[in-house]
Image (cartoon, helix red, strand yellow):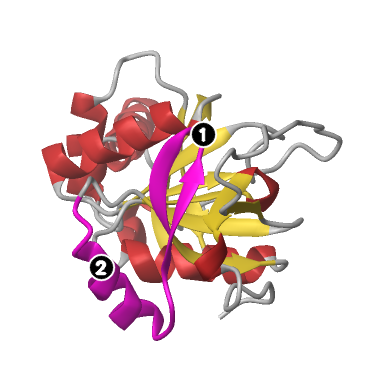
Amino acid sequence: MYLSSVHKFHVLTSVSATSFLLSLLSVIGLISPSIAGNKQPLPVCQPPDPGEHLVLVISNFKHNRSQLRRILPAKTNILVCKYIQNTVIRVGGFRKVENANRWARYVKDSTGLSTIISTRPKGNSQFKIDNDESGILHQLGHGYAVLVDYLKHPEMLELIYRIMGGDVCFASYGKRSYLLAVYTNSQTDAYQTLKKLGGHGLIASIVDSRKVLLPHSCCQFIIPGGF
């Protein structure tokens, strides 16, 4: 069928406007991916740099992510990515586990979202731990320790015992007291433990086990190798 040049122009303009509108609506999330086109898969979360601590906020729903962005500082280094089978917001740049713990607790108190704290031991780090004058504290060997900030509530020991299905011990890390959930040589096992504890709303961290001190009474059952 013959179309006049004016009619052709109107058709092209209409198509261009429709494409632009679909793209705009897709960006602001008002139409489904089936209309706007295939949605790009989320990247896998990158591990922390040596000596860095990450706060991973489990956020499988878009409104959770919007809620989180409202409470974080504008310049916070964040990324939405996949961690195991969850969508998380990766908040990086923490150099002290205490700061990461403080932010994780703030996020959980403000939003109710579960958080995981992850770190990578420095491969060539050397450090000294002063000898305990009482002679009852012992240093763990190489590996990963999963610690739980029990917020000065010792009754959490029983809860973590039920979750982990085994012995739990008080531990010292960075001159603070924690509960040791697991000590393992396997990073995979350590991350799985974090996921398990986070699913129960607990704030947990992976740390370099060589910086963890235990009472002598705990050493008999703390064996690296996972859970």
Q: Amino acid at mark 2?
A: His
Q: Residues within 10 Å of mark 1 (few under 14, many from 20)?
A: few
Q: Amino acid at mark 1?
A: Gly
Q: Which mark is residue 66?
A: none
Q: Which element type, helix, strand or loop, lies under badge 1? A: loop
Q: Quadrant of residue 122?
A: top right
Q: Which residues are magenta?
A: 153-179
Q: Residue at x 24, y 55 (%)?
A: 61
Q: How many labels sit on residues?
A: 2
Whether residue 41 is visible:
no
In the image as oriented, which residue stretches furthest toward the top?
75
Left or right of 47: which side holds 54? left
Disc 2 versus disc 1: nearer the observer: 1
Q: Residue at x 25, y 68 (%)?
A: 200
Note whether 197 is above or below 103 in the view shown.
Answer: below
Q: Which residue is label 1 attached to?
A: 174
Note whether 69 is above or below 224 in the view shown.
Answer: above
In the image as oriented, which residue stretches furthest toward the bottom?
165
Residue 138 percent coordinates (x, y)? 63, 54
Whether residue 209 is visible:
yes
Left or right of 35: which side holds 170? right
Q: Nearer the viewer, residue 88 or 18?
A: 88
Q: Nearer the viewer, residue 140 or 8?
A: 140
Q: Residue at x 30, y 67 (%)?
A: 199
Note whether 158 is above or below 50 in the view shown.
Answer: below
Q: Which residue is label 2 attached to?
A: 200
